[in-house]
Structures are given as structure tokens and as C-alpha cells.
Image: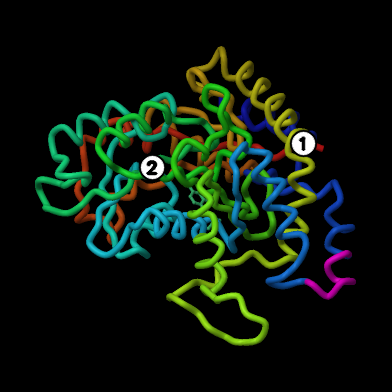
Amino acid sequence: MNDKIVQFIQNTFATKKFIPLHEPRFIGNEKKYLNDCIDSTFVSSVGAYVDRFEKEFALHVGSKYAIATVNGTAALHVSLVLMGVGKDDEVITQPLTFIATCNAITYCGATPIFVDVDRDTMGLSPDALHLFLNKNAEVKGNQCINKTTGKIIKACVPMHTFGHPCRIDEIKAICDEWHIALVEDAAESLGSYYKGQHTGTFGKVGAFSFNGNKIITSGGGGVVVTDDETLAKKAKHITTTAKVPHKWEFVHDEIGYNYRLPNLNAALLVAQLEQLDGFLENKRALAKLYEEFFQDSNISYVKEPKNSKSNYWLNAILLENKEQRDMFLEYTNSNGVMSRPIWTLMNKLEMFKACQCGDLSESLWLEERVVNIPSSVRV
Ligand SMILES: *Cc1c(COP(=O)(O)O)cnc(C)c1O
């Protein structure tokens, strides 16, 4: 079977050469806009492309404001800071995520709590969240207190795994009920919608990434989105060293970050955003081919969940068990087709071993079986 899969992928990408998991495509105005930047000398922290990108991105996802950042981790960090997450707070997230989610929580001085995912969405489960809170938390005033640690559960960061939306409306309702701020890690889900609404726009703030492997890229970059003008202003302020505007004086009114996106990267990003709709269509066609191919096999293809439209950023399949998974990884990677397992669960990593966890059976089940297969836009 594995040889047939390699053949199928080679045919689908029309090459016998190495096929990576996800390559960027620069087939639009990238060079033109980069040249503009260089010719204008505005390559760094000030420039028209940053403003243009922020306006166009906000329009694209349907949020009022977008604030570009130097990467997705920074966007997440700032989002959590905006929600007031600080020292000794706790933040609920899923164990099945990329390390950046937990790193950002830790940068605030806060500790992650791990709650299980749904098997079909691979994202945070509202049912598991509800169970965890009922068992372990209580609301005092307008704060959610963890009865075990006595600490405040300040925020919840669900993640839309590989671009498949989780049940974000139910998660939002639970967060509201428990006075927990919802911060969406939408790093992987640009172009993904849940019940017609763009992912990343359900909470007060949401974060996206434009790393080299994401659906569109600025080399490195990220963005925070929000509908709240005060939060948007604060985001801009703290990502640009918290400098007080003045003709010549250097006055900074709090500890800020140098998290702004350089104009060069923004130029690349504006060109990439123009091509997003085409990329999405292209990926949907690839997803359909994979779905049909795996229909009659004992490998199941992960389809977009109910009520949602996925960007199909990374295609995922489910092997029967860990042994089958390892054989698949071994065969494909030694035969020129790149594949990767899903992440090692965060609660198993040294830094997060002591963190509180709910029942994580679905995450453990998925961890042993999920594999990503080549998903680049085909040209
Ligand atoms: C890519 C990614 C991020 C952000 O990554 P950066 O490399 O910092 O842009 C955050 N969370 C998830 C789940 C991601 O996949």
C-alpha cells in the first residue's frame, strides 16, 4: 500500500523528485513589491506596505483591526498580554498543538493547563473544556479560579489544527460563562471559516502566522486581529516599543516589544494575500484527490469538520495504529515523499510535564496515528 501512496503523490505533484510537505509559492507581485521597498529605501519598521497589509488583512478576515507582528509567536504573546495574562495566571489550551502556543503562554509568566481535543476537529473540545471547568474551577466575582491551585484561569487558547476549525462558537460560550478570555490561535487557519465566520475572529483577539510553511508567507510574520479599538491601539503601541509619539523626543511609557513587521516582509505578504483565494481553491482540489484516493483503503483521510470550511493547509491522514504510522513515515521519507507525524503532546515535554491536565484520551489517540502528507499549492 505504501508504495501505491508514494506513486499517487508523485503523480499528483507530477514529479519523481523530492516532494516537501509544504512549499511557498511566489507567483504574483512579490518581486514587484519587494523592488518598490528597496527603491524607496523603506525596508524596515516604517513603510506603506505594513499599513496596506493591515488594512487588507482586516478586510479579508472581517475584523475591524489587524496589527502586523514579526512572527506568529509574537502575535500570540501580544494577544495574551492584551487579555491581561500575567505572572501566576493559568491559561487553558490543547496538548495537541505546535510548541509556539505554549511558549507564548509561558512568556507571560503564566502556566498552561491541558484540556483534550475532539477527534474529528483535532482542536480543543468544548465538551472536555466544560467537564474540566465543572470539576476544577469556580467563578468568584468575575474571575475563574482553579480550585486545585487557587490561581486565576485568565484565558483559553484553542487552536485550529492544520486549518480545520474547532467548535469555536461553543468554546466561546463556555469561556463567556466562566469569565475566561478567548484567544484564538489561528496560526494555521487563514482562509478557514466556522459557520461562515472567519477563524480567529470569534474571541476578543486572534493570532495568525506567516511563517515559511504557512498557507501564505512573509518569510516570517504574524498578525493580531481584533474588533476593539482600544485593544488595537494598545497592540500597535506595545509591538512598537511603547514609544509616545513626538517629533523628536524618545519617551516610552511602558515596557514594550520590538515586534513590528518590517516593510520588506509586509511587501511580500501583500503580494501573497492577493493570491490567497487561488491557493485555497488549488488546495481544495488537492484535498478532493486525496479524499478519493484514500476512500478504499484502511487509512482514513481527515476531512473538514461539520459546519466549517477548511483551508486544507496541511492534509492529514489517520493510520491504523502507531506501528502502521511508523512504517508509513519510514517508507515515504525514504522514498522522496516527505511526511511528518503530528506533534508530541505538549504535556509530555520536559517544560510542561508538571502542568495540570484533563483527561487526554483523544489527544493520545490522535498522537499515535495522525500523519501529514505533501500539501503545497500545485503549479
Ligand atoms: C506556526 C504556528 C504558530 C506561530 O509560529 P511562528 O513561527 O512564530 O510564526 C503558532 N501556533 C501554531 C499552532 C502554529 O502552527
Helix, strand or loop for disc 1: loop
In percent of width and height, residue 312 lies at: 61, 32
Q: In which quadrant of the rendered image does the N terminus lie?
A: top right
In the displayed structure, 265 sits above or below 337; it is below
**Circle number at residue 189:** none
Residue 81 drawn in magenta: no
Residue type at mark 2 is Leu
Magenta span? 36-42
Horizontal side of 222 relative to 114 (left or right) equals right
- Quadrant of the rendered image containing residue 8: top right
Q: In which quadrant of the rendered image does the C terminus lie?
A: top right
Residue located farthest toward the bottom when viewing the structure as drawn: 249
Residue plotted at (38% across, 44% down): 157
Horizontal side of 108 relative to 258 (left or right) equals left
Is residue 327 something that shows in the picture? Answer: no
Q: Nearer the viewer, residue 155 or 163?
A: 155
**Circle number at residue 182:** 2
Residue plotted at (59% across, 40% down): 63
In percent of width and height, residue 155 lies at: 32, 47
Helix, strand or loop for disc 2: strand
Of labels 2 and 1, the one closer to you: 2
What predominant SS class does the magenta segment belong to?
helix
- Quadrant of the rendered image containing residue 310: top right
Between the residue at mark 2 and the residue at mark 1, the CA separation in whole angstroms equals 35 Å
Residue type at mark 1 is Arg
Q: Nearer the viewer, residue 78 or 10?
A: 78
Residue hosting label 1:
378
Residue 39 drawn in magenta: yes
Q: Earlier in the sequence, mark 2 or mark 1?
A: 2
